[in-house]
Image (cartoon, rainbow, N blue to C red):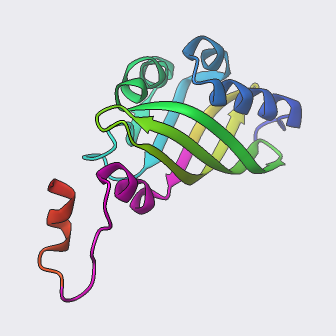
Amino acid sequence: MEAPVSRSVVEAFFHAYASRDPAKIAPFIHDDAEWMIVGPIDLFRFCGQRHGKAAVVDLFENVVPGILHVTGFDTEILLVDGDRAASFSRVTAIHRDSGRTISYRCSHFLRFRHDTVIEFRSVIDSFDAAEQMLGHHIDLSPEASAPLAVLAE
């Protein structure tokens, strides 16, 4: 286990993360960061895996702003233990293509090294977010034909 991270460092990271400002986030990202957001990559291009600080900064400079204008990020639960932290949060954003306001929950699991994020894992409630971005319910009932085809609409 790495040296413990202080709660104040974790809170400062999440404050920077909530700002979505790459200049505020960058100092908290380790040069060798492993960053992964679990979700449907075809619908949410910001999902997937990124390696290194430059890729993470690009995520906040270009990828996310091209899809969402984040208007709110509220951390409901924050746990810090040793070199790790976990959170449960709500994201509110405006989908750039449709103008729809979406709000979804996500969890984050982080590992810190020298007060920087070396490992980031996020899981979003992507089904809920997908329905909101698409603007309709996704029918997964047995009676529905080709339920995944709804995502292509």
Residue 132 in picture, x, y percent from top left: 39, 54
Seen at 42% across and 24% down, the residue is: 65
Number of labels in the image equals 0
| Image quarter in which the C terminus is found | bottom left
x then y, percent, for residue 27: 66, 15
Observer able to see residue 113? no
Is residue 103 shown to the viewer in this render?
yes
Instruction: Report the side of 27 relative to 148 (left or right).
Output: right
Task: Magenta stretch: give its range.
Answer: 121-143
In the picture, the quarter occupied by the N terminus is top right
Identity of the residue drawn at 35% across and 25% down = 66
Q: Position of residue 128 (x, y in %)?
A: 44, 61
Residue 69, relative to residue 136: is it above or below?
above
Residue 78 in magenta? no
Residue 38 horizontal side relative to residue 150, left or right: right
The residue that appears at 65% across and 15% down in the rendered structure is 24
Q: Is residue 15 left or right of residue 132?
A: right
Please tell me which residue lies in front, 60 or 68.
Answer: 68
- Residue 141 among magenta residues: yes
Toward the viewer: 123 or 90? Answer: 90
